[in-house]
Image: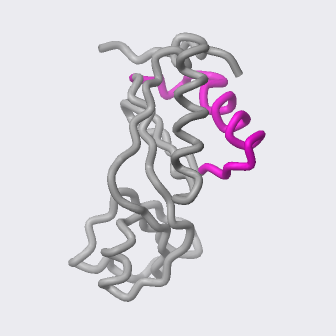
Amino acid sequence: MTAEGDPAVLLRHMKPEMQPGIFVFCTIAASESIPAALHPLLTFREQEGTTLVVLREDAEATGLRCAFPSRLITLTVHSALDAVGFLAAITARLAAAGISVNAVSAFHHDHLFVPAERADEAMAILQAISKTNAL
């Protein structure tokens, strides 16, 4: 399947899906290894340390300090990595509703981490955008 780059097509076909579990963001020192018991969904190395996005229960079991309990919403349309405006349109609409979002673009899809307590509201907004293709 070819990746889509047209924002209007992406919005119409994004079909958001909420993934199970509550995810948290943790950090470890850049010199530290990722604990063997953890299987991060996402890792990102920064100068200040390595960010790990893991299930909350896994972070708690390993004693990691964590922040931003969130739900993961996957936009199932195959979006092009160079698509212009797709995530901007979505994050602007969520921002207008007062919902923060941490977006991650992977090879096939875009993924949104939204506050756990606002996840159902975020899903409703995303579904409405997809149905009406309107912001």
Q: Residue furthest right?
A: 96
Is residue 99 covered in magenta?
yes
Q: How is the image coloured?
A: one colour
Q: Which residues are magenta?
A: 78-101
Q: Nearer the viewer, residue 89 or 121?
A: 121
Q: Position of residue 52 (x, y in %)?
A: 42, 67
Q: Residue furthest bottom?
A: 63
52 left or right of 9 in image: left
64 left or right of 34 in image: right
Does 13 sit above or below residue 32?
above
Q: Position of residue 110 (x, y in %)?
A: 47, 36
Is residue 105 covered in magenta?
no
Which quarter of the rendered picture does the N terminus lie within?
A: top left
Question: Which quadrant of the structure image shows residue 74?
Answer: top left
Question: Which quadrant of the structure image shows residue 132?
Answer: top right
Q: Position of residue 131 (x, y in %)?
A: 54, 16
Q: Residue at (31%, 75%) from the top-left corner?
A: 58
Q: Residue at (45%, 43%) from the top-left corner?
A: 73
Q: Residue at (58%, 24%) from the top-left corner?
A: 128
Q: Position of residue 54 (x, y in %)?
A: 37, 66
Does 92 sit above or below residue 82?
below
Q: Nearer the viewer, residue 118 or 5?
A: 118
